[in-house]
Amino acid sequence: SLPPWGPVKMPAGPASAISIASPGSVADGFVDTAVPPNHGSAGGHRAQGNLAAEASQALQALQSAAATDEQRIVSPGQNGGSERTRITSPDFSSNKVQESTASPDTAAGSGAGADEELVEEEEEEEEEEDSSEISASDEDGSWIAWFCSLRGNEFFCEVDEDYIQDDFNLTGLNGLVPYYDYALDMVLDVEMPMEDALTEDQQEIVESAAEMLYGLIHARYIVTNRGMHAMYEKYRSASFGRCPHVFCQGQPVLPVGLSDLPRNYTVNVFCPRCHGLFFPKSTRQANIDGAYFGTTFPHLYLMTHPDMIPAKPTQHYVPRVYGFKIHQSSLYFRNHEEGPEHRSESGGRHSRKSKNRQGGRK
């Protein structure tokens, strides 16, 4: 293999010299070293040995100088254990120094930073949702719109303020709702005078009273023509849910209460197809007071719109055991049709008969 500085030239002339050309470390010229040849046998061998030694020394010096000039390795940094390599070129000393950094800790840190950013984004979204719920009344300028937009209040429709401002529609509610005047002002967004400022505890009571007052007004509003039209839009979009009965095939349901007085029962949903009563699918909606919808709405709504009454399901579930129908005289149907009182009485009769039979045998 040839040395890095080029071939060694050996001219044939007797008076010629061996010239070694190598790139200089300082300048880009050539350094010529001439050694006259010796014609003696012993002197010639010594000259050749000295020449080889000098050539090897020069080769080592040039290689070390070239390695030092071409690549300079900097020791690992102190911060984070990152390893940096700086490569400089003697021919392009005026160029900018190129640095390459590779650190596993930095990569891991970037991954952890990305996870933290995702968590922060999720927290910001939750805070935005909460703040949107809180500031909805300020944005829309209406307490009613804010209340109906809350999670779990999808069953409610927006009552017209004209209906609420009519005192005839509020007859009898002042005896059911505490802080009635303050609650009514809150529902209608009436500003409270400074001298009537409430404490924090009183403010919470007034807010709860405003929700109750609006719910009771809502129960009266949805049985009017305007209220039924507003509920029709929700019923058509199945906002109240669908019947869980298999043979009803996803029939939309209507909200109903079991009492017209507050704080007795929670709201249920009524299926117009099978006339079944079910709990709402959402737990938030299942905690709404049933008096806020009343016992009249779904039935009056269907009577007012008879074209919306669906047909009764034609299929009926038949219980079977290993493919055979259960006979009507079995206890499976008898205990189902009879109440627990009849079961206890029939059980006492059977026990008495068995005792009498045992006594007769004795």
Image (tube, helix red, strand yellow):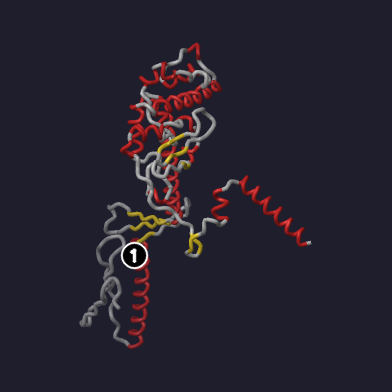
| Image: 30 above or below 183 | below
| Image: 82 above or below 56 | above
Residue at x 40%, y 59% (from the top left corner):
73
Q: Amino acid at mark 1?
A: Ala
Residue at x 36%, y 41% (from the top left corner):
238
Which residue is outermost to the top?
195
Residue where numbered disc 1 is placed: 66
**For numbered disc 1, what is the local secondary structure?**
helix
Residue 156 coordinates in the image, percent (x, y) = 41, 32
Residue 115 coordinates in the image, percent (x, y) = 44, 48
| Image: 90 above or below 336 | below
Nearest the camera: 154 or 305? Answer: 305
Residue 160 coordinates in the image, percent (x, y) = 36, 23
Which residue is outermost to the bottom?
41
Query: What is the quadrant of residue 139 in the picture?
Result: top left
Query: What is the quadrant of residue 254 in the picture?
Result: top left
Query: What is the quadrant of residue 329 in the picture?
Result: bottom right
Q: Is residue 132 visible?
A: no
| Image: 150 above or below 163 | below
